[in-house]
Amino acid sequence: MLKMTRFLTRPIHQSYFVVALAIGIIVGTIIALVFRINFFASPLWLAVTTILLIIAYLKPKSALFIIALIAGMLISFFRSTIELQGEDYIRQFYDQTITVTGTIDGDPNSDEVITKFKLTNLNFGREGGEPAHETSGNLYVSINFTDQIHRSDQVTLRGKLLSGFGTYSGYLYKPTIQKIAHPDPGDWVLNLRNWFADRIASQLNEPENSLGLSYLLGMKTGLPDDLNDNLRTVGLVHIVVASGAHLSILVEVARKIFGKLSRFSGLLFSCLFILLFMAMVGFTPSIMRAGIMSILALLAWYVGRKFTPWRLILIVAAITLVANPTYIINLGWLLSFASFTGIMILGPKLAQFFYGDRQPKFIASIILTTISATLMTLPIILYYFGAVSLISVIANLLILPTLPIAMGLTFLTGAFANIPLINTAISFLTTKLLDFHIATVNFFAAAKFFLVAIDPYQPQVFLIYIIIFIPLLVGLIRQKMLKSKQIEHQINREKICQDTANGPPPSAKKPS
């Protein structure tokens, strides 16, 4: 009892409350979405949360760790309530003809027959002169092909609303466009991206052009369906989802160029590159995760500190879920975090298991990183797609090392598009490398013998994580126990040395 009291009253560092808050937000979001908890809409809950956080921060004791956890759950309940109430409002219009105005989120995906896009910032029209109703949530829209709409445009649609799926609250199939309003002033970042993409397209054919644009600018909407399916089958869908791999390349370039001026210049231009890339790609769940994580890591590097990987993962997950609780069921968000978790947590453990205290060499490091990311994303891919190639690791090893080169060549293709001879040479090299990537993906996707196929949406596949994490947990416990014994042994040795230096106690001395 005394030990428990001492533990609960033991002072701890304030950073643990940030971790507790993040865990509370993640757990609270899952609970809120599963049980549809939607009665925390009052701002009073934010006031209660603020008071709890002040108490926990000013009195940093172990017993108050639970208060920070509860505060995080209340934040997630409040934020999730907004989304759930928006979904409930939209559901009442299922199978009805509606008029809705919203903003196009992300690039519309067109195949010269159908144009598909995501509609957010919804405003439902009312009949009889009643004011329109603004609500949260988003709609999946599929209309006849048009090239008149772009990202950030505001459109008014009229059509029959069908039930939603995944993270979408509803589905509009072939509605009529009532009105299109382009933003004023226009999206200059989007215009810059499209201008540069047109320069690249003038030098490359399809599908090399679409693959190069997906690498460099995150424009994966133009990828052919068969190539997209093969990327998923081979476990390479993450290379065309703009995320951490792309940002790490940009950050490395910025730090090498501008870091020579000063440490602050390296930080500033790296952050600017990240924000510009995020604006070009669009604020998708995966790019938000990668962007926030990269900026936090850069700030820690600048002040000479280092984030523990699992803390960084928890904090960034909490931040993105506060931005949008439905990210937790978004495929891009899940794959992004799973891949990063494999690289940052599972990868070092595998390296330690095989190499001990030695650092693996370049090729070995790539192999271990690829295996780690593949293992962590395997259950998610099996759950959503029901198929994965057993030799996807080999495909990753062939493509990932050349991904920075492919991005660089694609950039140079656009940069030198108007310079004769040079543009021909660069576009030739770019085409050959992208052809190698496409051939690699198609070859491994066609190897049906190595393809594991099951029915999708089987929750049992997530038991694979138990197989992965139990050895890690056992190893961590053993490591902590050995470290504790070493510390205890060191303390005993120091005590013995001190007693020896002081001589025997007076009672042990012989009388003269």
Image (spheres, helix red, strand yellow):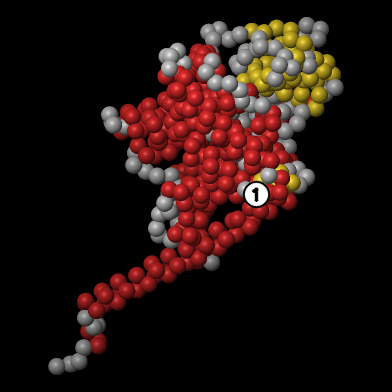
Q: Is residue 442 left or right of residue 350?
A: right
Image coordinates of residue 368 in percent, x first then y, are 51, 51
* Residue sitting at x 45%, y 67%: 482
Image coordinates of residue 498 in percent, x first then y, are 26, 74
* Residue sitting at x 37%, y 27%: 268
Front one among 348 and 120: 348
User: Circle 1 sits on which residue?
Assistant: 390
Asked whether residue 62 appears in the rendered view, the answer is yes
Kindly indicate the quadrant of the structure image that contains residue 157. top right
Q: Is residue 325 left or right of residue 64?
A: right
Image coordinates of residue 155 in percent, x first then y, are 68, 12
Kindly indicate the quadrant of the structure image that contains residue 455. top right
* Residue sitting at x 81%, y 9%: 127
Q: Is residue 44 left or right of residue 96?
A: left
Front one among 379 and 264: 379
Task: Inspect the image, locate mark 1, and give the three-letter code of the amino acid beneath it.
Answer: Leu
